[in-house]
Structure formats: structure tokens, C-alpha cells
Amino acid sequence: MSSTRKDFPWANSHHIDGDLREGVQKLKDATPAGVLLGSGKLATELDRLDMIDEYKLLVHPRIAGHGPTLYQGGLPSTRRLELLSAEPLHNGVVAMHYRRTS
């Protein structure tokens, strides 16, 4: 999500003008395989709008003493998740796939 960028030279990226909920819902409706996002800021806003159905997380084997958290400003309520899969990768990263249960 960018408040200033209008051009996206890479494939399968979309700029949403206007209402975020409406724009993302149209994109979800037009994309049966699902919509993937990689922006913490966008994830926070979509989670606050209750629009995230599944989470795919990569956990890297590093401890950071500072930096951003997943949701800087927090969320209005707790998210319950069901683990669908967890796969350790050759570099020590663990790829996890969760679905929201409530």
C-alpha cells in the first residue's frame, strides 16, 4: 500500500483508490485464488477492517532488539488462528500458514 505511488512495474500489483474496504473486496471477489499482501501497514489496516481470512508467516531465526512489530498500533481484539501447515526451510526459516477461526 502506498499513499503516493501510482505505478507498479511488477506483475499482479494493484493500486486502490478511494475506500480501502470496497477496493479490496472487489479485488478479492475477482480473484478466486486469493489476494496476497506483503505490507505491514496494509495488513494492519485490513485486519482492523476484519478482511484477512488467512495468514502466511515466515519466521526467521533472528532476535531483533528493535524495529517494527507486526501491528504497531495493536488490534481492537484478539485473533484466534488454526494452524494449517508449518514447513521448516533449508535456511532455518519456518513457513507457517494459519486460518482465522473467529
Image: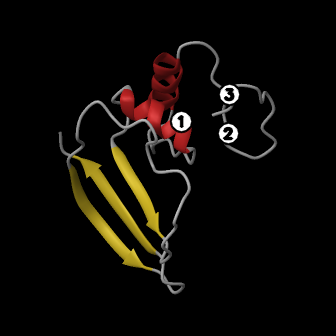
Give coordinates of residue 27: x percent, y percent.
52, 28
**Residue at the disc numbered 1:** 42
Give the structural element (helix, strand or loop) at label 2. Answer: loop
Q: How many marks?
A: 3
User: What residue is rendered at 27% in x and 62% in y?
Assistant: 84
Q: CA distance from mark 2 to mark 1?
A: 13 Å
Give the structural element (helix, strand or loop) at label 3. Answer: loop
Give coordinates of residue 34: x percent, y percent.
45, 43
Which is nearer the N-term, disc 2 or disc 1?
2
What amino acid is labelled 3 in the image? His
Classify mark 2: residues with Cα within 10 Å, few (<14), some (14-19) or many (20+). Answer: few
Q: Who is closer to the viewer here, 53 or 94? A: 94
Relative to residue 80, is residue 9 drawn left or right? right
Q: Are marks 2 and 3 in contact (CB under 8 Å)?
A: yes
Classify mark 1: residues with Cα within 10 Å, few (<14), some (14-19) or many (20+). Answer: some
Q: CA distance from mark 2 to mark 3?
A: 7 Å
Relative to residue 72, is residue 100 drawn left or right? left
Give coordinates of residue 79: x percent, y percent.
24, 43
Please say which color scheme the image uses.
secondary structure
User: What residue is rendered at 43% in x and 43% in y?
Assistant: 71
Q: Is residue 51 above or below residue 16?
A: below
User: What residue is rendered at 63% in x and 34% in y?
Assistant: 1
Classify mark 3: residues with Cα within 10 Å, few (<14), some (14-19) or many (20+). Answer: few
**Residue at the disc numbered 2:** 13
Give the structural element (helix, strand or loop) at label 1. Answer: helix
Q: CA distance from mark 3 to mark 1?
A: 12 Å
The label on residue 15 is 3
